[in-house]
Image: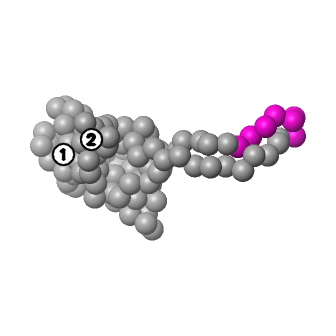
Amino acid sequence: MANIKKGDLVQVISGPSQARGGDRGKQGRVIEVLVDQNRVVVEGVNYVTKHVRVGQTQRGTKTGGIETHEAPIHVSNVALVDPKTKKPTRVGFREETVEKDGVKKTVRVRYAKKSGEKL
């Protein structure tokens, strides 16, 4: 089971501060997880400008120009946000028994280490 998944709220914990034009301290939702590269794409963080060749769609509207996109950021530079305190926390795993239709099953569950809250 992964520490950070798609849809999690994370905070950037490294890099230049916002006063210096960086993204440290910003929070956003994870849009995509690139497992093979150990990177995540976070909404509103690490914007880059991308030059796209001008073309036309089938309806005749022009596409292209200079666009801004979120670029991937390394997973070690973000931390999951604790749902209780709204501050970055580490992630732990614990076994919990869940009863469904009279059958008991052990399931691994992620939890925030600071508050103990289930994620």
Which residue is disc 1 drawn over?
A: 89
Comparing labels 2 and 1, the label whose residue is closer to the camera: 2
In the image, the segment drawn in magenta is 58-64
The residue depicted at 87 percent of the width and 35 percent of the height is 59
Mark number displayed over residue 20: 2
Q: In the image as oriented, which residue stretches furthest toward the left? A: 114
Q: Is residue 61 magenta?
A: yes
User: Which residue type does callout 2 highlight?
Assistant: Arg
In the picture, measured across the screen, residue 74 lies left or right of residue 67, that is left
In the foreground, 27 or 6: 27
Q: Which of 27 and 90 is in front in this view?
A: 27
Q: Which amino acid does label 1 sit on?
A: Thr
Q: What element carries label 2?
A: helix
The residue located at (35%, 58%) in the rendering is 74
Secondary element under disc 1, as helix, strand or loop, is: strand
Q: Residue at x 41, y 46 (%)?
A: 46
Residue shown at 42% from the left, 37% from the top: 44
